[in-house]
Amino acid sequence: MKAKKYLCLPMFLLAGLTSCDGMLDIDPPTDSYTAETVYGSEESIEALAEGLYSANFGDMFYLIWQELFGGFCADELLCRSTSYDDFVQNVYNPNTGNLSSFWTKPYSTIYHCNDFIIHVEPSTLISEAKKKVCLGEAHFFRAYSYFLLVNFFGDVPLVLTNNYEESRLLPRTAKETVYETIVDDLQKAVVYLDGSDNPNTKVTAEAATAMLARVYLYIGQWDAAAKEAGKLIPVADGGTGTKFVLEDDVNDVFLKTTREGILNLDCTNRNGDGSFQKSTMIGMFFVSASQNPTYYLSDELVADLQEDPKDLRGQNWIKCVEKDGVKGKYFPYKNKYSNDASVPSGREEYEPFLRLAEQYLIRAEARVHLKDYTGAVSDLNRIRSRAGVEPLPAMTDENKLLLAVEEERRKELFFERGHRWFDLNRTGRADAIYSKVSYKQWVPEASLWPIPESEMKANRYLEQNLGY
Amino acid sequence: MTKVIYFVGSADSRLVKKRVLFSLLTFFFLFAAVRAQDLSQVTGKVLAADDTPVIGAYVTVNGEKGGAVTDADGRFTLRVEKEKYPRTLVVKYIGYKTTQIPLYSRRDTHGQIIRLEEDNYSLDDVVVVGYGTSSRKKLTGAVSKVDGSIVAQATQDAPILALQGHASGVYVTQSSGVPGGGNTSIIIRGQNTLTSQTEPLYVVDGVPFNAATQNPVGTSSTGVFGLPDALSFINPSDIESIEILKDADATAIYGTRGANGVVLITTKKGESGKVKVNASFSTSASYVQKRLDFLDTSTYLEMRRRAYESDLASGALTTDDYNTANFPDLILWDDSYTDWQDAMMGHTAMGYDAQLAISGGNRNTSFLVGGAYYTSNTVLVSDDQYTRWSARANITHHSDNNRFNMEAGLILSNIIMDSNGGSSPYGSLNTAPNTPLFDEEGRPYYVPDDPDYSSATSFLASEADNKSVNVMGNFSASYRIWKTLTAKVSLGYNHSSSDQQSLKKRYYYNPYNPEIHSEANYYMAQTTTFVVEPQLTYTAGLCGGTLSLLAGGTYQNATSKYLSFWGREYLADSFMPNVEAATQMLSNTNPYKQTKTASFFARLSYDWQSRYLLNVVYRRDGSSRFGPEHRFGNFYSVGAGWLFGNEPFVKERVGRVLSHGKLRFSYGRTGNDGIGDYAYMTKYSITSFPYAGSKGFSPDNIANENLHWETTNKMDVGLEVGLFDDRILLNAAFFYNRSYDLLGNVNVSGQTGFSSIATNLNATVENKGWELELNTQNIKTHDFRWNTNFNITIPRNKLVEYEDLENSSDYTSYEIGKSINLVRGYKYLGVNPDNGVPMFEDLDDNGRLSSRTDYQFLGTTDPSFYGGLANTLSYKNLTLDFSFYFRKKNMQVGYFRHFGTAGGRNNVTEEVYKHTWTTPGQDAKYPGLTTTSASEIGKANAYLSSSDFAYSTGSYLRLQHVTLAYDFPQDWLVPFHLNALRMYVQGKNLFTISDYDSYDPETASAVPVLTSFVFGLNVTF
């Protein structure tokens, strides 16, 4: 029938419509890229590595929160309002968002690094020289992320894959095992970054070495710690390093041009969150014109820094506003290149991430444990002399020496990267110190933060820390 | 036809002339005779029951071509081709029963006076279904229809909100009492999916409109207005009817998007006849009725002092903490009093509405052109304004022989939302009563030198301006190739663009915080959708019944893009709208998204003698949202109906009582593609913040390549009964739906590097329920009428299966066998009388509270049942309409979630303060006074929001509206040349009966539903 013939034609057209898959091809999005694109050329692989920097060093989290929360939890920093009382008094609430970020942000970096390493290691699209540098950077960032996780939370899941099916239900891995991965990563980073021309605002082999020294110290491998630190300490002080030297003036320690900075973070040009342009964290948040700044250093810390009137650090690295003869509360004043101050040229300051002074202190502590008391004292004195303080006499009491190291670390590294909080926890001295602080509700379990409640809900194989 | 033979030069010229004359006369006579046959007419007059002429009624003769339209006097003249008797004259007019008059002889063809009877309630009328229309009585699917007049009566700015309580199976909630409806949500027959979108598919005059992805408004900021009603770009008075397709039979033809139901909107079309002009005006005044009894200043300060003393005594605070950061209300401020409820939302909102529509047409063509304007401000202190300009044009044409039909329409609208406030000031309602609102210079008040203080009036230093333009055009043309075959093509085009500016002036942020200065965000978004749908319909008789076949295809292409950038640190607030005045600028993303769908559908309907009905639908759909292997899906449905009321043996017995009886059943499968575009691809994007001047890439998401459709199988059983000539109409239905392969952004643990992934969950959700609709014409006399419409829905939702729930990241959120809208949390056990600390049930008795072991099932936020009762009473020219809406819902986020307990720097109600624990041994309802989260009470208070303490009841009964209208009688109007004049007053939301412990059980934490008074006028000439 005619009708049938005519009916068939449009039917075929319509059937053709549905089987033509090509009809559903769409333009790709313009704001994101697929794995093929991103791993498909040298420039984009480099950009992906570059992304590690902006995701980590361009982000407030890494720049200020470690100091802030590390400071609250330790005996360094206080806040006028009660908003951070749960950290200041060490009565952590697993439901707070801040706590959650300390877990999710490092893991986000870890994924980025895992994905990167898995794709780039076998890649032939990038030159060997550049590949090494990028991989070195990825290993460094992964190591540092795990370093933060174990020091804040203790045992954490060890994720080395980019496959979420495999990683999502992993239980916590013992701290010691995680540290093995950290060490491994840093060693690889040292090898990969050897000879790279990264400036000290980016990750270099020296930065990896410095980090390695710190990690060896934390896990008690004294010999290795001393050795690594020695690679950075200048020959004049008994090391083999050639690149870095302690600044003589305490006010030069944090300059952009400092010779002490192994990894110095460039905090300018932060157009993304433009307000931080040309300013350090301390300059933005802590320097105050008020006698009662929102965040202020604890009386104990100020007392320690000013105990010795000659200590240049107590005179230059903290400040308070004095009105009518009354001194207000102190705030940190280390790197203070502030937003609205007119800073004399050549005096721009950066954020210290890794600096040489710490290496001296690492080696000092390691040497104490290795029974090289003279060496330990000489390292301590090198720091003390720069700070204008009398050198220590020769000492042989190991405990006293360890206390001296603790004191020196307290004064030199206060309000930097959470050193105080990590130090007292790893040396087991937390209970002794914090239980005596009147404003804290200290219990031994408070050395570790609880796993965030949201993570406990998302992964049933995570065991919560004691006390929560 | 006789040939005229012209004899030239014949012998007898007179004879010739006679012959010629005779031939000519024969010719003309025959011709005249034929013409007389052609000129056969039928004339008459059509009147309504009260003898008024019916203008524009359409008169035809059964089985013959041509038709006539009655004029202003109701008269018609119908030309008919041949003299043929008997024949039937058919007169049709909307609102009246189609009348058939038999014509037996020539005598019947003139002077007929035909009286039309009014059509009884709804059932015989035409219902719009997917790709066609159907007689309501012959529907095999579940379709609810809401007439345009109900929509227009309920609202002037939010058509979806107007459906609340008027259609069974359709659950509508308003989320904020602001113009535009503020995030109206509509869920048809329960929520099928866990986390992906639950919006139904909207089809406006045949053009599909996916509100979730095609509406660029609200993607940035709309201030207090939230996300306006998805259909707010349509003037509600322009709507002819809204049909809601619920079951598989009705929705399967929409394939992938039918799982959540389909809402069909038909706009008014022109009417043939004289040109009619219709104008209407209305004005409204609205305000918030409810007030909570917050404390006055002296009682509040007393409470605060007691709280401080209590904390001091317990050691949670030291005297050092008595500073301006923690206690500005006791130290800095005086004891003046501000009623924050009045200050924040005590205004009366004024609204104005004006409309004009011109329609007309002749036998073949009709048109409608109209425009409307609506504007309203809000009850909030922040001087916000919502304005809509809209215009519409519509033209329909059919050829004389009705073979060619064409329709074209255009809807244009421009919505301007001017919000001088950030968002709902709900959070400011419980501000301490002595808090200063402004500083000496009239800027939002901040405690001096305190960078952490958040001001209760800071939102007044922000503005959000949003202008959006929406253009929707539709065109369809059909041609009847043979009597049985019609070809049709429909084209639809929709373009929405939105231009937004969100300004946060200097004092929006704390001026003592060096972090940011002023900031503004500029945003421009656009979405364009184009759809083409060719169709073929074939109708034929088969085995004594009518067979109807529809086959068609859809091709749709939707693109969207936006550009946004922000500026920081402006020279002064007044420069802010100018982006160049920013000291720093950042351009944000500029994503471009595209979705394509291609489908083939077919429908077979068979009607045997109006007694047995069968409807089979098939659709094959492809969507670009899914990975290349999973793009296509097959959907289908089978529907059957038995009009037992038409069975002879039934008619014989109960025919006088039973005017309509139908039993219907349907089963089918529909889909849902409600996931973002490109979600199946692993993506990387540019990092937000540069480091040392450069940015790079970082991973954006993890993806599931196998992302595919979510499927819902639906079953529906219905019974329809009409009694006493349809004076009582009952429609009862039972539905049972199962959804699986649920689409959504599923939580994953943070150690994966991300917090969620778009994937299909191996889980099954079941939705079932009962629906009942009862329409009665209680009283029907010449002068007085009373109609009632009652509907109720009893839905039940259940999570039937969730593979490996215990190992997923949802294991504390869901429970098999319970609704997916459940609430899990700690069980609140009251206050410890010794120390005022709130207590919670510790299920595993280990002295610690953890979500993993101590969370338990607390209830669901599903409605247990909901429905409406509408009444219309009319006496002569006066009409009274009133309708109720009721809902039973056991859990709604309540007072404590938003306003907290007593002691902190926030006000509480008298009731709360009276029952707050103060002395040991007291059996109090609410936890003791404390000012900090570090005290024992404070630490325990942190668990309150995850417990049932934070919930109250969500059940209520509301008088939705009462409308009194008067239609001026004809004789008053004639001297003014008016056809109709109607005046009305209306009261909306006059009272609400509820036990909810805060403002409004429907809107919870946003502006309550407003009480309004409206006055309006409607004139036709």
Image: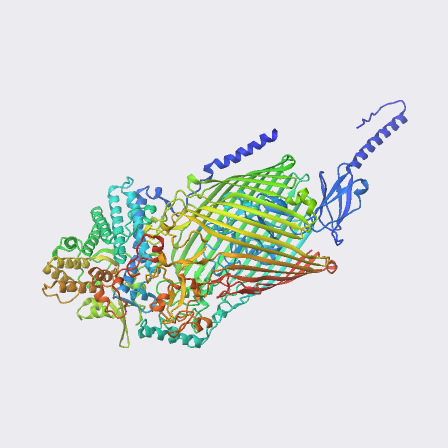
* Placement of B925 over or under B811, stated as above or below: below
* Placement of B798 over or under B65, stated as above or below: below
Q: Residue at x 41, y 56 (%)?
A: B566
Colour mapping used in the image: rainbow
Q: Is residue B286 left or right of residue A291?
A: right
Count the numbered circles shown.
0
Decide if residue B747 is in sight here.
Answer: yes
Image quarter of residue B20: top right
Decide if residue A341 is in sight here.
Answer: no
Q: Is residue A458 left or right of residue B530?
A: left
Q: Position of residue B577 (x, y in %)?
A: 45, 60
Q: Quadrant of the C terminus of chain B?
A: bottom right
Q: Nearer the viewer, residue A257 or B196?
A: B196
Q: Position of residue A428 (x, y in %)?
A: 20, 61
Q: Quadrant of the N terminus of chain B?
A: top right
Q: Nearer the viewer, residue B126 or B641?
A: B641
Q: Position of residue B472 (x, y in %)?
A: 55, 48
Q: Position of residue B357 (x, y in %)?
A: 64, 53
Q: Residue at x 83, y 33 (%)?
A: B29
Q: Nearer the viewer, residue B384 or B568?
A: B384
Q: Is residue B959 left or right of residue A396?
A: right
Image quarter of residue B785: bottom right
* Placement of B132 over or under B302, stated as above or below: above
* Placement of B118 over or under A318, stated as above or below: above
